[in-house]
Image (spheres, grey):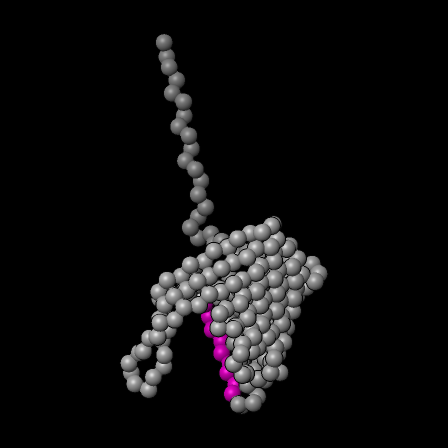
Amino acid sequence: MATTIPPSPAPPTTPPASAAVEPQKVDYLNLPCPIPYEEIQREALMSLKPELFEGMRFDFTKGLNQKFSLSHSVMMGPTEVPSQSSEIFKVPTAHYEFGANFIDPKLMLFGRVMTDGRLNARLKCDLTENLTLKGNAQLTNEPHMSHGMFNFDYKGSDYRTQFQLGDGALFGASYIQCRLRGKIDSNGVVAALLEERFNMGLNFLLSAEIDHVKKDYKFGFGLTVGE
């Protein structure tokens, strides 16, 4: 009885090595919305500048209902006192902090009172779907140490803008779009950074900072090459 041997399957075809992968075209009319301005360096700061402390620390939070909670913090440890010599003097200190928190989908309030008389307050309120008001303030018994600031954040389809207003005639504005970053403040400093992707693994950079008061002008360009 004759048997037939089935033909072996053909090897899978692979594209020639010379075939280049076409870069994905950027639709500038459909760009993603960037993250808020103050969160750009948050991850890096948490890793490079962690909140270190010396001594003992105890934190306790008690929720009274779904939106309101109270917090208690106790910390005991030395405090470094500056001196004219190179030696470091440490004075034992202890303080207690009482906090109240109100968290709602459109309104968040945070307050902290410390035993040394300092009062810290933060506010976040969604005025509209795209416009958010943020504020923070610190009140102390020391002269010229109290301050406050308000931020108005607007979220567009593919960009974010922020306007800052603080005490001491301080104001600033920023603009971010996945490609262009810009900033202007009350010191007369204007800065911008443009990043354009020409191809996969090839980015072109333009940087500029203008300080009219100090007559300091900085311009730069660069290339980023790599997979």
Q: Is residue 129 visible?
A: yes
Percent position of residue 212, x then y: 57, 88
Q: Which residues are magenta?
A: 216-224
Percent position of residue 118, x then y: 52, 72
113 relative position to 134: left or right: left
Q: Quadrant of the C terminus?
A: bottom left
Q: Residue at x 39, y 28 (%)?
A: 8
Percent position of residue 54, x then y: 35, 66
Q: Residue furthest right?
A: 128
Percent position of residue 103, x then y: 61, 56
Q: How many marks?
A: 0
Q: Residue at x 41, y 68 (%)?
A: 94
Along the line of sight, the residue nearer the viewer: 164 or 202: 164
User: What secondary structure is the stretch in magenta mostly built from?
Assistant: strand
Along the line of sight, the residue nearer the viewer: 8 or 64: 64
Q: Is residue 97 magenta?
A: no
Task: Please tell me in which quadrant of the rendered image residue 79 appears.
Answer: bottom left
Task: Please tell me in which quadrant of the rendered image residue 165 appears.
Answer: bottom right
Q: Residue at x 45, y 46 (%)?
A: 15
Q: Quadrant of the N terminus?
A: top left
Q: Residue at x 35, y 72 (%)?
A: 92
Q: Residue furthest top?
A: 1
Along the line of sight, the residue nearer the viewer: 48 or 79: 79
Q: Is residue 49 visible?
A: no
Compared with 225, 61 (above or below) is above
Compared with 217, 113 (above or below) is above
142 relative position to 170: left or right: left
Compared with 27, 220 (above or below) is below
